[in-house]
Image (cartoon, grey):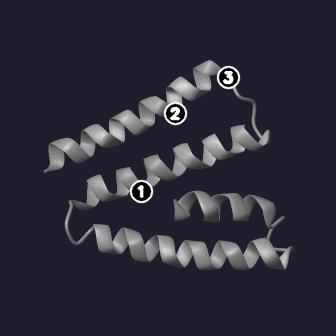
Amino acid sequence: MLEAVWATALGRSDGFTKPGPSIIFLVAMTLSMIGLASAMRSIPVGTAYAVWVGIGAALTAGYAMVTGAEPLSAVRVMLLLGIVGCVIGLKAVSS
Protein backbone atom coordinates (compact mmCIF):
# COMPACT_ATOMS: atom_id res chain seq x y z
CA MET A 1 0.00 0.00 0.00
CA LEU A 2 2.87 2.36 0.73
CA GLU A 3 3.87 2.38 -2.93
CA ALA A 4 0.43 3.74 -3.81
CA VAL A 5 0.82 6.38 -1.10
CA TRP A 6 4.21 7.59 -2.30
CA ALA A 7 3.23 7.51 -5.97
CA THR A 8 0.12 9.57 -5.27
CA ALA A 9 2.07 11.99 -3.06
CA LEU A 10 4.72 12.35 -5.76
CA GLY A 11 2.05 13.33 -8.26
CA ARG A 12 0.63 15.88 -5.85
CA SER A 13 4.02 17.33 -4.86
CA ASP A 14 4.14 19.36 -8.10
CA GLY A 15 7.81 18.58 -8.69
CA PHE A 16 8.63 18.70 -4.96
CA THR A 17 7.42 22.31 -4.71
CA LYS A 18 4.66 21.48 -2.20
CA PRO A 19 6.14 20.52 1.18
CA GLY A 20 3.26 18.40 2.55
CA PRO A 21 3.03 15.90 -0.31
CA SER A 22 6.84 15.93 -0.65
CA ILE A 23 7.27 14.88 2.99
CA ILE A 24 4.58 12.20 2.63
CA PHE A 25 6.41 10.94 -0.46
CA LEU A 26 9.75 10.67 1.35
CA VAL A 27 8.32 8.90 4.41
CA ALA A 28 6.14 6.49 2.41
CA MET A 29 8.96 5.73 -0.05
CA THR A 30 11.36 4.93 2.78
CA LEU A 31 8.85 2.68 4.56
CA SER A 32 7.92 1.04 1.26
CA MET A 33 11.57 0.16 0.56
CA ILE A 34 11.93 -1.25 4.08
CA GLY A 35 8.87 -3.41 3.44
CA LEU A 36 10.27 -4.63 0.11
CA ALA A 37 13.62 -5.47 1.73
CA SER A 38 11.80 -7.38 4.45
CA ALA A 39 9.79 -9.37 1.89
CA MET A 40 12.99 -10.28 0.04
CA ARG A 41 14.17 -12.17 3.12
CA SER A 42 11.52 -14.84 2.64
CA ILE A 43 10.56 -14.83 -1.06
CA PRO A 44 12.64 -14.63 -4.26
CA VAL A 45 13.70 -11.16 -5.43
CA GLY A 46 11.79 -11.36 -8.72
CA THR A 47 8.57 -12.41 -7.02
CA ALA A 48 8.93 -9.83 -4.24
CA TYR A 49 9.51 -7.02 -6.74
CA ALA A 50 6.67 -8.14 -9.01
CA VAL A 51 4.27 -8.23 -6.06
CA TRP A 52 5.50 -4.82 -4.83
CA VAL A 53 5.16 -3.15 -8.24
CA GLY A 54 1.97 -4.94 -9.29
CA ILE A 55 -0.01 -4.28 -6.13
CA GLY A 56 1.36 -0.73 -5.91
CA ALA A 57 0.42 0.04 -9.51
CA ALA A 58 -3.05 -1.46 -9.15
CA LEU A 59 -3.75 0.43 -5.93
CA THR A 60 -2.40 3.69 -7.35
CA ALA A 61 -4.50 3.42 -10.51
CA GLY A 62 -7.54 2.26 -8.54
CA TYR A 63 -7.27 5.20 -6.14
CA ALA A 64 -6.92 7.60 -9.08
CA MET A 65 -10.08 6.19 -10.65
CA VAL A 66 -12.05 6.34 -7.39
CA THR A 67 -11.03 9.98 -6.78
CA GLY A 68 -11.79 10.99 -10.37
CA ALA A 69 -8.18 11.80 -11.27
CA GLU A 70 -8.36 9.12 -14.00
CA PRO A 71 -11.35 7.83 -15.93
CA LEU A 72 -13.18 4.81 -14.53
CA SER A 73 -14.25 2.09 -16.93
CA ALA A 74 -15.04 -1.60 -16.77
CA VAL A 75 -12.11 -2.38 -19.07
CA ARG A 76 -9.64 -0.52 -16.83
CA VAL A 77 -10.96 -2.30 -13.73
CA MET A 78 -10.70 -5.69 -15.45
CA LEU A 79 -7.12 -5.00 -16.53
CA LEU A 80 -6.16 -3.98 -13.00
CA LEU A 81 -7.77 -7.14 -11.65
CA GLY A 82 -5.67 -9.02 -14.20
CA ILE A 83 -2.51 -7.50 -12.70
CA VAL A 84 -3.62 -8.50 -9.22
CA GLY A 85 -4.44 -12.02 -10.43
CA CYS A 86 -1.02 -12.38 -12.01
CA VAL A 87 0.69 -11.19 -8.83
CA ILE A 88 -1.27 -13.74 -6.78
CA GLY A 89 -0.27 -16.42 -9.30
CA LEU A 90 3.41 -15.49 -9.04
CA LYS A 91 3.29 -15.68 -5.27
CA ALA A 92 1.43 -19.01 -5.38
CA VAL A 93 3.99 -20.69 -7.67
CA SER A 94 7.00 -19.31 -5.77
CA SER A 95 6.13 -21.21 -2.56
Whichever of callouts 3 and 2 sits on the residue coming sooner in the sequence is 3
Of helix, strand and loop, which one carries label 2?
helix
Q: Is residue 2 left or right of residue 14?
A: left
Q: Is residue 76 above or below residue 20?
A: above
Distance between mark 1 and mark 3 Cα atoms: 24 Å
Residue bearing mark 2: 80
Whichever of callouts 1 and 3 sits on the residue coming sooner in the sequence is 1
Which residue is at a point 60% across and 26% down the rendered structure image? 76
Of helix, strand and loop, which one carries label 1?
helix
Distance between mark 1 and mark 2 Cα atoms: 14 Å
Tell which tag, 1 or 3, sits nearer the viewer: 3
Q: Are marks 1 and 2 in contact (CB under 8 Å)?
A: no
Of helix, strand and loop, which one carries label 3?
loop
Residue bearing mark 1: 52
Which residue is at a point 31% across and 74% down the rendered structure image? 38
Residue bearing mark 3: 73
Q: Are marks 3 and 2 in contact (CB under 8 Å)?
A: no
Q: Quadrant of residue 44?
A: bottom left
Q: Is residue 8 left or right of residue 20?
A: left
Tell me the crowding category of disc 1: few under 14, some 14 to 19, or many 20 or more residues within 10 angstroms, Cα based.
many
Which residue is at a point 56% across and 47% down the rendered structure image? 59
Whichever of callouts 1 and 2 sits on the residue coming sooner in the sequence is 1
Q: Quadrant of residue 49?
A: bottom left
Q: Position of residue 70 (x, y in %)?
A: 75, 37
Distance between mark 3 and mark 2 Cα atoms: 11 Å
Mark drawn on residue 24: none
Q: Position of residue 87 (x, y in %)?
A: 34, 42
Q: Amino acid at mark 1?
A: Trp
Q: Amino acid at mark 2?
A: Leu
Q: Position of residue 16 (x, y in %)?
A: 79, 73
Q: Is residue 84 above or below residue 34?
A: above
Q: Amino acid at mark 3?
A: Ser
